[in-house]
Amino acid sequence: MTPRIEGLREKSYHATPSISHERALLVTHFYKNHHGQFPTPILRAKCFYALCADQTIHIGDDELIVGERGPFPKAVPTYPELTCHSLEDLHVLHTREMTAYEVPPKVFEIYEQDVIPYWCGRSMRDRVMPLFSRPWHMLYQAGAFTEFMEQRAPGHTTLDGRIYQKGLVDWKSEIARHLQHLDRLNDPDAYTKQNELIAMDICCDAMILFAHRHAQLAKKLAEDTDEALRKQELIRIAQVCERVPAHAPQNLHEALQTYWFLHLGTIMELNGWDAMNPGHLDQHLYPFYQRDLQKGILQPEQAKELISCLWIKFNNQPAPPKVGVTAMESGTYNDFTNINIGGLLSDGSDGVNDLSYLLLDIAQEIHLLQPGFNVQISQKTPQRFLEKACEIIAKGYGYPSVFNTDLVIQEMLGMGKSLEDAREGGNSGCIETGAFGKEAYILTGYLNVPKILEITLNNGIDPISGKKVSIETGDSELFDSFEDLYHAFERQLQYVIDIKMEANHMLEQAYAREMPAPFLSVLIDDCIEKGLDYYDGGPRYNTNYIQCCGTGTITDSLSAIQTHVYDQKTITLNQLVGALNTDFEKKEPLRQRLWNHTPFFGNDDQAADHLMQRVFRSLLAFVDGRPNTKGGLYHLNMLSTTCHVYFGKKTGATANGRHAGLAISDGTSPSHGADRNGPTAVIRSLAKMDQAKTGGTLLNQRFSPAIFNNPEGIKRITSLIRSYFQLGGHHIQFNVVDTQTLRKAQEDPEQYADLLVRVAGYSDYFIHLDRSHQEEIIARSIQEDHATHL
Amino acid sequence: MEKALVFMTKRFASDDGRGIRTTLFLKGCPLRCVWCHNPESWTLEPQIQYCQEVCIRCEQCRDSSKTAEEISDHTCPTGALSLVGKWISLDEAFALVMRDRPFYEESNGGVTVSGGEPLMQSQFVKAFFQKLGHAGIHRTLDTSGFSTLDIFQHVLQDTDEVLFDLKAGSSELHKTITGQGNERILDNLSYLDHHTEVDYTIRIPMIAGLNDCNEELRHIQSVCKGLSRIQTVQLLPYHPWGLRKARAIDIHQDTYDTHDSEMSCRRWIDQLEKDLPRVRLMIGGMK
């Protein structure tokens, strides 16, 4: 690390996340003055223009890549048009123990005087949520599912390489061409398209203005400084900001700044989930890197420094503040940028290049919370690259996660994408599959599958509240066979998913009509061509995901019922339900029997794995291939983020012997402590899921550092990964840390301030996790030597 | 059909040879090493073990008579009371280890048979290794070397690698700490070295106060110098994992100093490096 990078890194690491009122105030003023004057897309575009024109801009000392979302690093704006925080929300944000945001008194004042009086009752959350059906609210409160767009806009977007080929000026001409060719006579949607295209054009101007303001500021700073070297740098920055993103970048510095401005634009426009993502950054930057080196205008060390400057920028943008259920399903400052390294090129050849290795070096050196990064491993990926990734994993940073590029492509082909688009795609957020630059792949919320079994066992009643939250599918006394029970479970599952989808459709239309994202739409194919917004079917592909949690818990619970109630008949279903609803009170021997004498998922056990496959098929049947409102389809995603901890709190004891309130299993990893035959058995079990039919699965593996501490150990891990991928696995991630270290970190957080751990598709500082998440990670089975007594 | 009494299996075993391996631990051993980390492997019959730490005192076992024949998986909810050792057929054993075949192929791994002393069930091991050989799976035998030469020869014909656990170089000491002298063991080692082409590693457990003295070091040096194909010597520092298992089957075991054992490993490595310059010396699985 150069002294510059060291300094910038330190500053970013130590900056405190705080709430800035600036965006909220600008947006409020804008809406007060202009709401009703323009068609909605144009209103949104002009609002974006106002932000780009009036927001405080910031160029930090020593920076080479410039621009912040807020007035200074880690000053986080709010989006009152989506969710208007109450004073109480702000107080909670300010004072809560975990993921707190400093809220200065000025913010309270402005919220009370300006923001709340205008937005209360007008925000998307206030207007749309009450329209949801009563059954939806009942199930939502019971914790059967969550709603992703409750506080944040749909997003989840990754860019492809086209932003480096053309500048916004070029896209403006493209927009103009489409405007000119609108068939205003015969196309009934011509008016809608015209508004959207005009909005996009305004957004291009807005972003160019934003960049030019940075150029002006850089010039002024250059004039003000006496340091000759810094003066030169600032002049250079000014030149770069004059050119990009208006024009296509011509060198590495411009390419990096191009991406960063576009990134900022999307997260200023709205607070879409999972920020923004450069996707295959190594592949996109490589031509610039090569050219600059050849021309002799850049040394490798300078390239590294420039890219490092961008890297640190991500860390300056904590996630927008979340409260309530949304904070629980995703309680982190991490905003899920997940850079893809490696993979394939669009012609199917190996995509690993010198920059792939350099990015791994940078990530390892900088070692901050953000950005996340993953390695894309195909059969063509060189072994050396995988080994290097595993060497970083071995250090225990929780990064990078590892994806099976070949399967990811297969997933996308199954969803109807072209082979080239699939190869240019990859993974973003935690583990989600998408066609970069061409797709809106929207996460709509998590589904608590074990909870639905609990509701089934109680005939539609949530035993925790005692309220009827779902349909009646029969009293547990009446299920004479496992088949009867499973059938009832399927009916409940279908009902809950239908209720969720109904609300999804309403919300997605509300965004399409009232909260379009014309700036984002400029960046995603084929919004310009279609004249349609990103939220309105503009992208080439429009996927909705429902994320299903608790594969381990649901499989093991069904397995326990099948084994003990129906096969061995040692307990009736009614007795079992009674024990579950009292959390095994005075029934410890029963709990032990369920826990110790049931075939569980994750052990390569045919009986248990068949149940997993059955549940998976049911989920597929009720989710996969159903239409959304934008001309796209729903697909399954097997992801949990931190939601399995929240869902656990909302779910009583389960038949696998899990106590009430404890975390359920995550996306697709086995239940905590249920995998007793080591990682190969876990992999064999999970590989029995037809993962090609999902938009992603998640496998957490925790290893003792001893396994990794020699070259032979690293080779074993690379083999484990390659084998899993050959068997059809989507993703695997590792925590290489022993329990002792985690316990010490709990006792003495200050000493372990920078201990990063893998949570669920992203990493977080261990000491920033609340106790229940910390315990969840400690409870994951540790893969050491796995002996099974016979 | 051959059968084996197996007391433990380990998938993704990382200390039993190259690559990703599955290890099958056979029950029954002629030695009685005083520090043994698998004391439940000694007898060649299923036996009851009771793990106090896991027991919740539910007393559901009170009514059963607790003979080995009557203990089933379901006698005890927690598994505190259980039977160690199960007879499995050759086909079962084969099916079990073949589950991880994709991992062996990718990692250049395979199957290890350990114990106990696997040569006590040599007919099974021979048949098992033959079957694995036909399937192209790499086979490792982890043995103390205590058997007749006939049996050893017979099994070696179908073995790719031997982990040869040498407890002591002096026969007298060997007898003191394991109950048996080492004459047969050294003969077998010499046979392995001079008359076969099977790869082997010598593994020496280092137990502070038992076999880490200088005199023993000299014995080991002289054994190693007599070997022409010797490539690797691993010193395995004592660990106390056997204690809990010994308690569970009601055997008393002394404990030894782990730190001193590790220090002795280092000291020995320094010495052996001078005498055996071409031999790869390791502590545990590491250089």
Image (cartoon, rainbow, N blue to C red):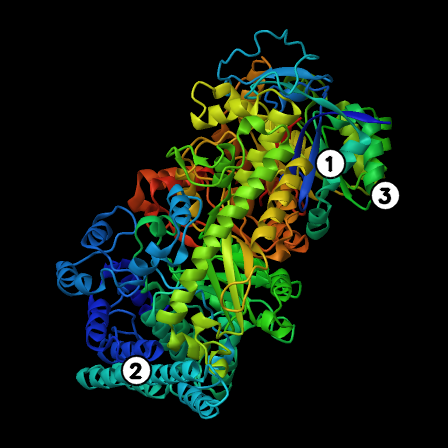
Instruction: Please state which of residues B216 and B260 is positioned toward the viewer in this rendering.
Output: B260
Coordinates of residue B192 in the picture (x, y in percent):
80, 36
Q: Which amino acid does label 2 sit on?
A: Glu
Instruction: Please state which of residues A53 and A513 is positioned toward the viewer in this rendering.
Output: A513
Q: What residue type is labelled 1?
A: Leu
**Mark 1 burial class by Cα count in 10 Å: few <14, some 14-19, many 20+:** some
Q: Is mark 3 on a helix, strand or loop?
A: helix
**Mark 2 burial class by Cα count in 10 Å: few <14, some 14-19, many 20+:** some
- Are the numbered discs 3 and 1 placed on the same chain, yes or no? yes
**Residues at marks 1 and 2 touching, judged by CB atoms closer than 8 Å:** no
Q: Which of marks 3 and 1 is nearer the N terminus?
A: 1
Residue A233's tag is: 2
- Are the numbered discs 1 and 2 placed on the same chain, yes or no? no
Which chain letter goes with mark 3? B
Which quadrant of the rendered structure holds the N terminus of chain A? bottom left
Q: Mark 3 points at which residue?
A: B134
Left or right, B252 with respect to A25, comes to: right
Which chain letter goes with mark 1? B
Question: Residue A82 falls in which quadrant of the image?
Answer: bottom left
Q: Mark 1 points at which residue?
A: B96
Q: What element carries label 2?
A: helix
Which chain letter goes with mark 2? A
Q: Which of marks 3 and 1 is in front?
A: 1
